[in-house]
Image: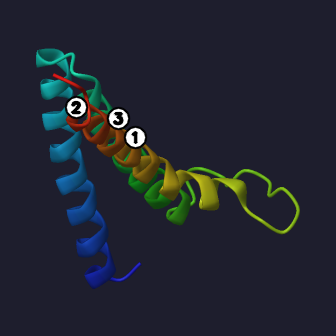
Amino acid sequence: MDSEQAIVVFSRLLVGALAAFCAIVLWSRTRDTAWMLVVGGTITAYGEKLYTVLNLLGIVAPLPPIGPVPLLAVVLPNIPAMFYISAFLVMVARSYEIR
């Protein structure tokens, strides 16, 4: 890993760690379903970044693929988006509630 790539990787980890920390602080302050899903998405996004970096450095071995598809390479990047989609759907459902 050259120095430019290291700067990019470590800056992503630093910003992701800051976002995950803020999400955990928010998690302890709110019990709102939509915000809990946003927090879950943020934390899993940081977990995916961390796993990718550890895999790149050879610290964590990749799981064996299922057929030709490496399962974690497909599933991990999509989990945060699924959390965010769920949060948005909760907010949309709230906006259609009869008052």
Q: Please report the residue visible at 51 percent of the width from the left and 55 percent of the height from the top.
A: 78
Pointer 2 residue: 35
Pointer 1 residue: 86
Gap in angstroms between the C-alphas marked 3 and 2? 9 Å
Q: Please report the residue visible at 44 percent of the width from the left and 60 percent of the height from the top.
A: 53
Residue 40 disc label: 3
Please report whichever mark, 3 or 2, sits nearer to the chain's N-terminal start: 2
The three-letter amino acid code for the residue at tag 2 is Trp
**Residue lying furthest front in this view?**
98
Q: What percent of the width, then of the height, locates residue 22?
A: 13, 36
Query: For numbered disc 2, what is the local secondary structure?
Result: helix
Above or below 69: residue 45: above
Query: For numbered disc 1, what is the local secondary structure?
Result: helix
Q: What percent of the width, then of the height, locates residue 12?
A: 25, 62
The three-letter amino acid code for the residue at tag 3 is Gly
Gap in angstroms between the C-alphas marked 3 and 1? 10 Å
The three-letter amino acid code for the residue at tag 1 is Ser
Query: For numbered disc 3, what is the local secondary structure?
Result: helix
Please report whichever mark, 3 or 1, sits nearer to the chain's N-terminal start: 3
